[in-house]
Image (tube, rainbow, N blue to C red):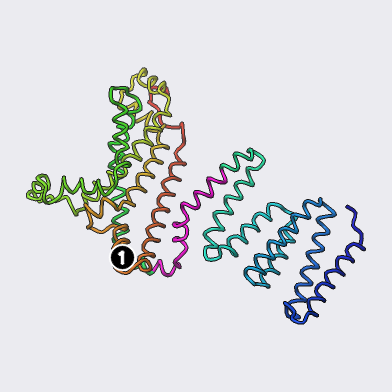
Amino acid sequence: MNLTWKHGAAVSMFVIAFHTVLALLPEPPFTVSMNLVLAATNLYVAYCAGTILRRRTTKALATFLVGYAALYLLTMVLLGKKPLFILLVVAYSSLFASPVLVGFFALFVLCFVVLQPYAFETFVPLSLVYAILVRLRRQASRFALACLGLGLVALIAVLFPILHLAVQDSVQTLLHALGRADVQEALGLSLLTSTLATLLVAVWGVPFAWALSRLEFPGKRWVESLVDLPILVPQSVAGVALLVLFGPGSPLGQGLESMGLPISGTLFALLLAQVFVASPFVIKTAMTAFEGVPVQLEHASRTLGASPAATFLRVSLPLAARGIVVGAALGWARAISEFGIIVLFAPSPVTAPMLVHTEFLRAGAFESRPIAVLLLVTCLWFFVVLRFAGTLVPFGLGRQPREARS
């Protein structure tokens, strides 16, 4: 559409006349200074609208005006914040030429105006989701993008309590909590026992996973189901089961106590509980990793004279190392977060989850929150390090038997 200076002048005169009428009302809705600022703002909006109509279509102009009306209803009518309306509408008019930037602007308004108490923890993940969808918009169908976007938003909703918790305390508050001796001991104990438990599971679970991936025998499906049992059994039930077996009133527990080897309430009890919950993650992930290793490579190694143990150590294990490291990371994360079994079977020495629980019972959520955030940061940091270590393992570059390389 061809717009002349006459059209612009007419629209400008209309905006000025409109605000003049507002100023002459018996009870004007705005002060004189605010009315002047709004007039200048609407002149700028009119200029941007003319630019849109000149370069694009009437549909784009209608969309622009709908956005303007939505901002007016939200900030002026519902919230009564006139300066906020001016700032947002100027930014909106300036960014409208770029649909991608308008999307980020809409997220900003949603998070920092509508969801203001939860602004940061909503804006950051939603912006990442939006950036991913924008990046993929030309590579995937709308249905695929809708499925991905819906899933990512639902995942953010599920994880939102954790995101909200992570931004509640300042760095000074966290450092003050970290300076407490009981917090340091609990975090150190959790790191130690979860690492030892993961290593113990790996020692017997990785060879076991290889055997399950290579051998066929009657009842194999039942055995694989038993591997999943620690995930299915409620942790309180597992805690009671371990207490009944190893507790002070049980025959085995009394026998061990008489030998000076009590189980319940000791470091060994913590390891038992963490091995129980971590084992399915390590074993099932290792099975998947070994199933991805071609059996022909193992046969070739055996044909060239390597023993079964040497083939496992020098062919199968290196080629499956990436998946095993990922499984170890999952098992470690599950072990360090265990609480249900420990609270019944091994309440002392105190781990970090137990300390959070104890502090909550003693002083409430406010006092226990910094310790919970420290545990969260520790878990996320070590989990990211372990997952990153898994990506560094070069897939397909494991050591082969010397006979195969000659």
**Residue 283 on image: x %, y %:** 34, 36
**Residue 202 on image: x %, y %:** 31, 39
**152 in magenta:** yes
**275 in magenta:** no
Quadrant housing the C terminus: top left
Residue name at image x 59 percent, y 39 percent: 144
**Residue 137 on image: x %, y %:** 65, 43
324 to 12, vertically: above or below: above
User: In terms of secondary structure, where does tag 1 sit?
Assistant: helix
382 to 370, vertically: above or below: above
Q: Between 217 and 321, which is closer to the camera in this rendering?
A: 217
201 to 22, vertically: above or below: above
Name the amino acid type tagged 1: Glu
Residue name at image x 75 percent, y 57 percent: 64
Residue name at image x 53 percent, y 47 percent: 152
Segment tinted magenta in the rendering = 148-175
Q: Is residue 401 left or right of residue 233?
A: right
Q: Residues within 10 Å of mark 1 (few under 14, many from 20)?
A: some
Residue wearing tag 1: 359
